Image: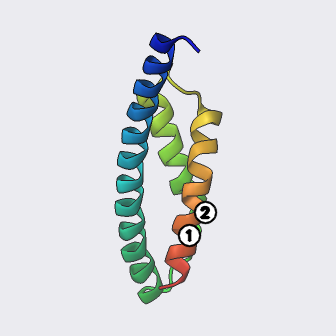
Amino acid sequence: MNPEIKKNLENFRYDIDEIDNKIMELLVKRFSISSKIGEMKTLNKLTINDPNRENEIIDRLSKDYIGALDFNQIASIFSPIYSISKQIQKKK
């Protein structure tokens, strides 16, 4: 492989690693808040599953990031996030 291409690839991978770390930090923070929401829902005998809220988030994000990602792409990113959040909420 061309040394210049290899160096550029390494730089891009470093950038991706940094972004991945930031994503994980934010997800940990999000799941911590989900845990608190789970406690509130349990205390108030509310259901964990809230599809309307999930769709509301995806709708908002698809409008905020129009052109970057479409509705289905955003939904496919957030589906596992919702799943983990619900698992965390059920533990409370």
Q: Which type of secondary structure does the marked residue at label 2 adopt?
A: helix
x, y percentage for residue 43?
Answer: 42, 88
Number of numbered tags placed on the structure image: 2
> Is any part of residue 48 visible from this angle?
no
Residue shown at 39%/39% (left/top)? Answer: 19
Q: Amino acid at mark 2?
A: Ser
For label 1, count other residues whose C-alpha is less than 10 Å away and answer few (under 14), some (14-19) or many (20+): some
Query: Callout 2: few (<14), some (14-19), or many (20+) C-alpha neighbours within 10 Å?
Result: few
* Mark identifier at residue 86: 1
- Give the position of the N terminus as an image quadrant: top right
Along the line of sight, which residue is nearer the eye, 77 or 16? 16
Residue ID at (38%, 48%): 21
| Labelled pair 1, 2 in contact (Cβ < 8 Å) | yes
Write down the quadrant of residue 28 in the picture: bottom left
How far apart are labels 1 and 2 at the CA level? 5 Å
Which kind of residue does numbered mark 1 sit on? Lys
Q: Is residue 17 visible?
A: yes
Pick the front one: 5 or 21: 5
In this figure, which residue is indicated by the disc labeled 2? 83
**18 horizontally vs 45: left or right:** left
Q: Nearer the viewer, residue 31 or 21?
A: 21
Instruction: Label 1, secondary structure: give it.
Output: helix
Q: Position of residue 53 (x, y in %)?
A: 51, 55
Above or below residue 44? Residue 75 is above
